[in-house]
Amino acid sequence: MAVTIRDVAEHAGVSVATASRVLTGSRNVSPVLAQRVNDAARALGYRHNAVASALRRGRTNTVGMIVPEIENPFFPAIVEAVERRLQGSGRDLFLCDAQQDVAIERHRARALANRQVDGLIIVPVSSTASRATLVEVTERTPVVQVDRYVQEYPADWVGVDDQHGISLAVEHVMALGATRVAFVSAALESSSAQARHAGFERMIERNGLPHDTPRLLGTFRAEWGRAAAIELLAHPPMPDAVVCGNDEIAVGVLGEFRRKRVRVPEDVLVTGFDDIRFAQLADPPLTTVRQPGDQLAAECIRLLDARMADRDTPIQRVAIAPSLVIRESTGGSS
């Protein structure tokens, strides 16, 4: 027969309420009583069901988070920042990888909702195909989108101004004399890819740059950066600057240029986006657009807490200004 909290209380010679306070940590109890209850629990082999207790209180002190792919170094950095914020308020994070698949993303969202997480933080895989997941899960739990968002769907979001970030990179290479600027980024599936591409097109129009400048769209991975660099080298004239949609792509571009003995920054300038930890360790160190991870995490938790407190609070969209970090890949110094 399973040991109950009543058995523990009787063994310790205290009330059930006192035993409950000790075992849940919900209120302070004198050290003597706490010791008696804990000794009784150990002697009887009692195991406290924290999940059941939390559900009775209406909170589990857990938050779920889904990212498109954990292999992308930007997402672990955001996860780490979010987890630090949650730990400060005594909450735990359940992390899921959607593996760039909207079906897996939906399955993970359902699983987290079934675990009764208090809220869900999601970086949507797709700006359109992830809509079904948000429609379903927002009926069950508060949701905040971070970095990326689903188009025309009323859910809280926090991220950087991607268009402005790309404009910083383009303005920087133009100030250094670049007139033929190539853009290497990801296919226009996510909101971040779309916004960065739109930012590049806007800068081309605004500054009267050649319209035939290369725009190569693939994935947000280093392998695509290498492939894109091969494509640029195979179809001269070479651009005098390559603005990349993220740092992984830029690292791939740098590696292939180095292999083909194309000098950076002497022959071509290269920029990235995100400022992942490895950006300053690239060869040469990478000029990039920095996303303020700690600020993103803080705003994300603020929005989630507000949504948890009042499900009917007005939708908030918070765009944070990124900044440009200049390093050797455009002739700066680290």
Image (cartoon, rainbow, N blue to C red):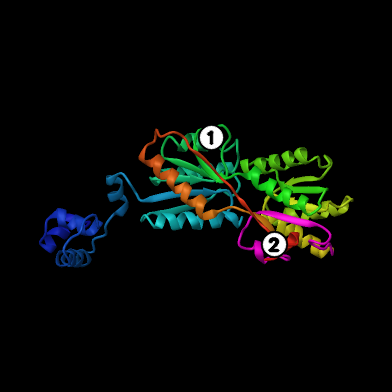
Examine the rendering and report whether any part of residue 65 can be seen. Answer: yes
* Camera-nearest label, 2 or 1: 2
Instruction: Say which quarter of the image contains residue 284.
Output: bottom right
The residue located at (49%, 51%) in the rendering is 297
Q: Is residue 264 magenta?
A: yes
Q: Where 209 falls versus 293 (above or below)? A: above
Image quarter (top left, top right, bottom left or bottom right) of the C terminus: bottom right
> What residue range appears in magenta?
261-284
Image quarter (top left, top right, bottom left or bottom right) of the N terminus: bottom left
Residue 327 is labelled as 2
Residue where numbered disc 1 is placed: 132
Q: Where 269 falls versus 98 (above or below)? A: below
Q: Give the SS element for disc 2.
A: loop
Q: Give the SS element for disc 1.
A: helix
Mark 2–mark 1 distance (CA, rounded to whole Å): 42 Å
Task: Give x and y (percent) for residue 301.
Answer: 44, 48
